[in-house]
Image (spheres, rainbow, N blue to C red):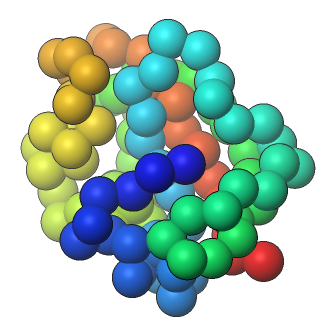
Amino acid sequence: MMFSRELREAVANGEITVSIRLWSRPKVKVGGRYATAGVMIEIDSVELLPFCAVTPDDIRRAGERDRETLRQRAAHTGPITDETLVYRVEFHVV
């Protein structure tokens, strides 16, 4: 998984453990290990849900200050409304 430059350090040190992705299909799998941000991460869960179901804890764990900032970051491949289905990916550094 790729992360924005400003998030990479927080991913590498384990501060960011959730990512919200606007994908047409999952691009990672549970148990898969992926090199990113100079470290290896392992995927703990992948869940498809409407953007309105993203919790305040998810927003914090994704390294964002609020829902709208997360919406803007995740919307790089298209607009995201509250009903838009997004992937919630939970991971940890190994």
Q: Residue at x 69, y 36 (%)?
A: 28
| Up-down relation of residue 86 to residue 89 (above or below) | above
| Up-down relation of residue 35 to residue 46 (above or below) | below
Locate residue 27: give its quadrant.
top right
User: Outermost residue toward the bottom?
Assistant: 13
Image position of 10 (left or right of 1): left
Q: Residue at x 23, y 71 (%)?
A: 6
Q: Residue at x 20, y 37 (%)?
A: 71
Q: Give the camera-side residue of 71 and 3.
A: 3
| Up-down relation of residue 9 to residue 42 (above or below) | below
Locate residue 59: give its quadrant.
bottom left
| Up-down relation of residue 36 to residue 12 (above or below) | above
Q: How many marks?
A: 0
Q: Residue 60, can we see it?
A: no
Image position of 84 (left or right of 30): left
Image position of 76 (left or right of 57): left
Locate residue 84: give its quadrant.
top left
x and y, in percent, of residue 55 in the image: 40, 48
x and y, in percent, of residue 3 in the image: 39, 56
Which quarter of the rendering shows the C terminus?
bottom right
Q: Residue 65, can we see it?
A: yes
